[in-house]
Image (tube, helix red, strand yellow):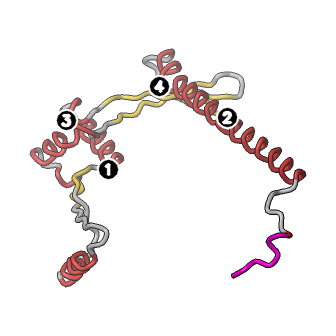
Amino acid sequence: MQDNYAAFRDDKPSDNLTAVLRTLADEYLAAEAEVARIEAELEVAKTNLKDIAENRIPQATDGMEGKFNLGDGRELQIKEEIRSSIAGEKREPAIKWLDEHGYGHIVKREIVFEFPKGDEARSTAFVEAVQKLGMPLVMKSNFSVHHATLNSWVKERLGEGDALPNETFGIFRQRTAKVKDL
């Protein structure tokens, strides 16, 4: 299709529009830099808060636990939590230990099947076969223990006086502090 008005059209923006766009581009870059600066400051502030709450105050109050009135309308709370983790290389030995010692019921067993993106025929046939069995189709291949379940189980077992392999379950005590207004 022929453009009869092409000779009369100027596709180049006017000098005024170019100046406005340059100003807006400068404002955009300045705002982007400000966001990056504030995000970096936020990360530093979070790291500082974590250090105070999880290291400095617990070290200063070693052996103490509970609530302390600071006498100025604030209260310092010191709490100890038992944490655990079976991430990475610890996962397999921890799951094996749980199974061997009668605690396999806290392990989630998941099965995953993957098909190439364009393999609709085989994936559809597979889904239909599973549906004929009357089972829901939620499949993933993994053995895991939810972190909250693991922490709860570790606390329960330690509370019962059971000896657990600390290295296998990554067991550690974490003291944390909070300051609250009364």
Location of mark 4 (residue): 65
Kindly report which numbered mark, 3 or 1, lies closer to the viewer in this rendering: 1
Q: Residues within 10 Å of mark 3 (few under 14, many from 20)?
A: few
Q: Earlier in the sequence, mark 4 or mark 2?
A: 2
Give amino acid for label 2.
Ile
Location of mark 2 (residue): 38
Q: Earlier in the sequence, mark 1 or mark 4?
A: 4
Segment tinted magenta in the rendering: 1-7
Q: Earlier in the sequence, mark 3 or mark 2?
A: 2
Q: Does the CB distance between marks 3 and 4 fall below 8 Å?
A: no
Per the model, the C-alpha gap separating discs 4 and 2 is 35 Å
**What SS does tag 4 mark?**
loop
Location of mark 3 (residue): 162
Location of mark 1 (residue): 146
**What SS does tag 2 mark?**
helix
Q: What x and y, as percent, mark residue 30?
A: 74, 38
Q: Residue at x 25, y 67 (%)?
A: 115
Q: Residue furthest bottom?
A: 132
Q: What x and y, as percent, mark residue 125?
A: 21, 81
